[in-house]
Amino acid sequence: MDAAFLGLVTIVIGVGGCLGYFYLSNQLLDKVLFPAKGVNAGRNINRANMIRPWIFLFPAIFALGLYLAYPVFATLWYSVTDRDQGGAFVGFANYSQMLDEPKFWEALRNNILWLIVVPAASTAFGLLAAQLTDRIKWGSIAKSMIFMPMAISFVGASVIFKLIYDTRPVDQKQIGVLNAVWLQFDGGVGSFLILRLVPISILVLFILLVAYMAWGAVRPLIKPDHVKVSKLGMPLRVFAGLVGVYLVFLSLQSIMGLATVSLNYGVPQTWLTIPFWNSFFLMIVLIWIQTGFAMVILSAALRGIPEETIEAAIVDGANPFQVFFKIKMPQIAGTIVVVWTTITLVVLKVFDIVFAMTNGQWETQVLANYMYDKLFRANDWGVGSASAMVIMLLVSPILIWNVYNARKEMR
């Protein structure tokens, strides 16, 4: 009863406070500061109307400044001071210490890997689900099932997948789904097909896709086919090409590893302790969650495509793949970019999944978990704040680009 009464009082005070603030601010503005009477009545009315929106926005601006702007400047200050020396200014010493730690570079490398894999996979699966569910009668039910993981917290999803990856001793029954499947292989033809040939085929297709996209990004720079490249687009295209080359290199290394690796058939695997691959097992959790978000947004975009363009393409003899890639994809490219960048922002701040499943062990460290370890476990506020500034610097270009595109569309 006390909790219910407290909640009621909070609602009354909150709503009543807002109504009181707007009423009193209007009275102060119209009756005291700029009264609409006398020889200056017209000028006062104009001034009051100019100031009134800012008075209404003041609580939100103040709250945002208190909870967003102040922490940014405070974190920046902590990153250049030493708490053990009474807050003395130490310049870039914390940044230098951070750059000398192997764990930071491990976290940065893993974050880059997450940024490459998760947004691409989530957007691709979301687009595939959106396209397929729109073509079946029970599509709404399928969409609900795919979107359901969005209602689960990151920690809850981590617990679910931790059970999927669970490992028990050899003499005990395996409750982890992945190990239960793994123990069915004994090194025969099925093992070769499923554990070697299928992954290698997927990687080969991935290499072809990445190479095609990278070539599409850098082609206007090599062969300018009347395609005007802006000053901002040039470095982005070069960066996209370099990322493509890096991904192809990593994929080729993975193919060599799959072809030569010795697999322990019949023995349960501790999946989350296998270096490099355990990061992909963690990524699957976020892909599982974000695919539903991508599907909903892209499904709405696909429904907004004019039917006339699709019908015209079919009349001209286009097959379903050409309709999808040549007609639909270009028309929803803007939405795909928005979904991609939104998921990218989520990936840059990923913390819960790594913290709940591995806590950064076995070479799975990411920047947010590294920051948490430094701030709250090592009590090293300087290095922890420096890593927080690194995360903010990585997020800022994406935010600026999104704002730029939003303003460009508004014009």
Image: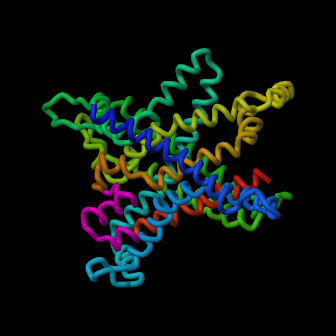
Residue 8 shown left or right of residue 395 in the figure: left
Residue 306 shown left or right of residue 124 in the figure: right
Task: Please tell me whether residue 310 is drawn above or below residue 212 in the rendered image.
Answer: above
x and y, in percent, of residue 119 in the image: 53, 47
Say if the magenta span includes residue 367.
yes
Viewport quadrant of the N terminus: top left
Find residue 281 and report its image quarter.
top left
**Of the pair 376 and 310, the residue shown nearer to us:** 376
Q: Residue furthest left?
A: 171
Is residue 262 among the parts visible in the rendering?
yes
x and y, in percent, of residue 183 in the image: 27, 31
Q: Residue at x 13, y 32 (%)?
A: 171
**Of the pair 180 and 42, the residue shown nearer to us:** 42
* Residue stretch in magenta: 363-386
Main secondary structure along the magenta-highlighted residues: helix
x and y, in percent, of residue 64 in the image: 52, 58
x and y, in percent, of residue 151 in the image: 44, 33
Residue 398 shown left or right of residue 41 in the figure: left
Q: How many marks?
A: 0
Find residue 38 and report its image quarter.
bottom right
**Of the pair 77 and 327, the residue shown nearer to us:** 77
Is residue 241 among the parts visible in the rendering?
no
**Of the pair 43 and 197, the residue shown nearer to us:** 43
Q: Residue furthest front?
A: 38
Task: Please tell me whether residue 393 is drawn above or below residue 295 in the rendered image.
Answer: below
Task: Please tell me whether residue 208 is drawn above or below residue 185 in the rendered image.
Answer: below
Q: How is the image coloured?
A: rainbow
Viewport quadrant of the C terminus: bottom right
Q: Residue at x 53, y 41 (%)?
A: 122
Say if the magenta span includes residue 137.
no
